[in-house]
Every structure is written in structure tokens, then in C-alpha cells.
Amino acid sequence: MQLQEKLIVEKVKELIEPVIKNMGYRLFDVEFKSERGWVLRIILDKDGGITIGDCEEVSKRVSALLDVEDIIPVSYLLEVSSPGLTRELTKPAHYEFFQGRLIKLILKEPVEGKREIKGYIEGVKEGILHIREKETNKEYHIPISFIAKANLEIEKW
């Protein structure tokens, strides 16, 4: 992402996060990308999940706020969505929020001979993810910089 896009994302986050929090939602992520034109994607979460009605409500409120503040210098499409059940985890705060949940990691480099680990998040401290492998119950300490991809997994009962 170029500098201008990063600045826009930071300004949007700063502007909308208090509003979204006040509405009872958590701001999971903000993206500003050139796809088939510019797209501002606001990704929400809340306990129990996000509904289409939640997305519509936030979209109306955020759209009005962004129109008044006029911080995006190009025309864009506003998208408000949920990160989904198998959402990708990209930031330390995501791992902290989902502590105790089952995730699947794909690593850039092997850790103790493994490039893929499925396990439960034990915590994050100083850039290190602590994860307990589901099958063996072994705990791994993985630098977040080693993670190529991480997604929540659906627990099968």
C-alpha cells in the first residue's frame, strides 16, 4: 500500500472508530484499495457476529460522517462487512482478541519442522504468538513475523 492509502486508512480509523464503538461494534479492519475503482472497506465485528442490518446501520452513519469530513480526495465505493467465520488474522490485536480460539497457521519458515500448525491461541507477548497445538497439546512460541497466513478455524464437535 502506498503512503497516501496508508494515511487515508489511518485517518478513517481515527474518525470512525469512536462512532463504531459507541454503536456497540468493534472495528476489525479498514482497507482502502484500488480494485475496479477505489474501495473503502470497513470490517466490523461484535460478540455474536455481524448481521446485514448491522452493516447497513454502520454504512449510513459512517457514510454521512465521511461526507462531512471529506478526507478522501477521490470517489470511492464504501463497503461495510463482517470478517466472516474463518476470518484472517493479520494483527497482534486480532490474536489477542481471539485468545482461546482455534486457528490454522501457515508459516514462512518451519518452526520445529512444521510449516502448518492448527491450535489454540494461548496469548501474544512482545510479538510472539503462543499457541497450543490441537492434536498434541504442545505449546509453540512463534514470532508473528514468521506467520504467512492465519485464519480462525470452525470448531467441529
Image: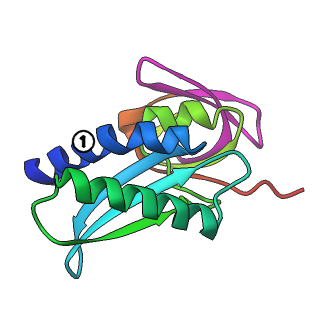
Magenta segment's dominant SS is strand
Residue 124: percent from left, percent from top = 53, 24
128 within the magenta span: yes
> Does 136 sit left or right of 122 as displayed?
right
Q: Is residue 52 above or below residue 116?
A: below
Q: Residue at x 42, y 45 (%)?
A: 90
Give neighbour class at mark 1: few <14, some 14-19, many 20+ (Cα, 10 Å): few
Q: Residue at x 43, y 57 (%)?
A: 61
Q: Secondary structure at mark 1?
A: helix
Q: Residue at x 49, y 58 (%)?
A: 58
Quarter holding the N terminus is: bottom left
Residue 115: percent from left, percent from top = 50, 48
Q: Is residue 35 above or below residue 123?
A: below
> Does 134 sit left or right of 115 as displayed?
right
Q: Amino acid at mark 1?
A: Glu
Q: Which residue is farthest right? A: 157
Q: Quadrant of residue 26?
A: top right
Q: Which residue is farthest top? A: 126
Quick one: 25 or 1, which is closer to the camera?
Answer: 25
Quarter holding the C terminus is: bottom right
Residue 98: percent from left, percent from top = 63, 38
93 within the magenta span: no
Quick one: 82 or 66, which is closer to the camera?
Answer: 66
> Does 12 sit left or right of 57 as displayed?
left
Q: Which residue is mark 1?
A: 10
Quick one: 98 or 143, which is closer to the camera?
Answer: 98
Q: Which residues are magenta?
A: 116-141
Residue 116: percent from left, percent from top = 55, 50
